[in-house]
Image (tube, grey):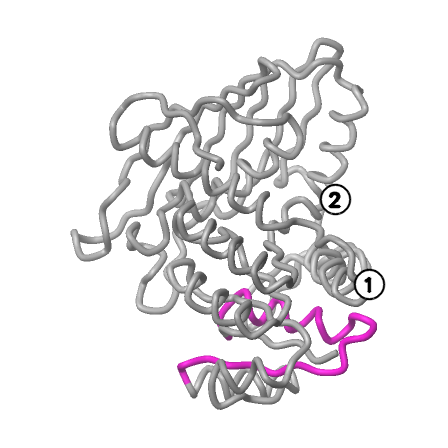
Amino acid sequence: MHVGIVGTGGMGNVHARHYKNIPGVEGIYAFDRDADKLNAFCKHHGAKPADSAEHLLSLVGSVDICLPTHLHQEFVLQALASGVPTLVEKPMARTVEDCRAMMAAADKAGVQLGVAHVVRFFPEHELAHKLVKEGKVGTPGAVRMRRGGRAPVGSDAWFQDAALSGGVILDLAIHEFDWLRWTLGECTQVYARSVRLGKTVDAGPYTGDYALCTLSFESGAVAHVEATWMDPSGFRATIEVSGSEGILEFDSRQNPVLRTHTDSGSRNESQMASTDDPYYKQLSGFVRAIQNGTPVPVDGREGLKAVGIAEAAIESAQTGKPVVPVYA
């Protein structure tokens, strides 16, 4: 099977690196409206360029949409109409309405639609989910999660325009929203506050964004989600689950890592085998689902519900009132 990648920015490069190692993937085709980025991407990954999205879809057995969030719906609908199984980066779309349209198109075409919620595949988050589900901390009562670092920019500063990216709540906190739903069950109410919600890069010098969201669940559990693009000290993710029988904790900064420093910069070296990498596990799971005709690891319904919680949080931050997520 050949895989197509639409969008050759940050996530497109991450995904391409792992597709090359997945059994059954014969090669990669790529498309980007920026010809310079496309050519550099293809040279680096040994991919073949497509002249257009239509051309790419005629050549591949599956397609991976790695575009900015506000462009997801357009290209996903095009891929599904062509009958090509589709994986779309998180968040699934800019709005729940867009998610609904994508799901309807997948149903009509009878093809698989997956959403790349990769945090489910990170070993600490995967194990924390398993332990909570197994009752290792008893009945969960309170959960605290934190994610963030410096503000991303992206092509034409699209991350910094909340109308395009949804800001820190939709683009970043959605990782936690998805993990919490997956682990605790359905969310019944969201209350949120945001530092910069609704402002764009054109409103003045961009200084980042910060949001604090409180989620209530049918189970009675309460979760606090902190998401920030205003931390100059770099990326950090944390989990704390307090239950009737104990507490589970994780802090990404407490993990010992090997760091490499060269003239090109510093980086953390992975301690995992390539086949244990979260992105590899996510993408290989999607490929296997296509090969075997089985359900994808994270489907459109899961992606829609995560966006529904994010939309509720955005509305709450705008109005100052608690909001019930819309899932249907």
**Residue 274 in the figure: left or right of residue 150:** right
Q: Quadrant of the N terminus?
A: bottom right
Residue 171 in percent (x, y) is at 44, 48
What secondary structure is marked by label 2? helix
Q: Alpha-carbon neighbours of circle 1 within 10 Å: few (<14), some, or many (≥20)?
A: few
Mark 2 or 1: in front is 1
Instruction: Determine which of the numbered discs, if any, sits on residue 292 in the image.
Output: 1
Q: Quickly name the residue at label 2.
A: 123
**Which stretch appears magenta?**
8-34
Instruction: Kindly report the distance in space between the C-alpha atoms of the residues bearing marks 2 and 1.
Output: 25 Å
Note whether 7 is above or below 282 in the view shown: below
Note whether 33 is above or below 272 in the view shown: below
What residue sits 78% from the left and 56% below the top? Answer: 294
What residue sits 49% from the left and 48% below the top? Answer: 234
Residue 325 in percent (x, y) is at 44, 30
Residue 275 in percent (x, y) is at 81, 61
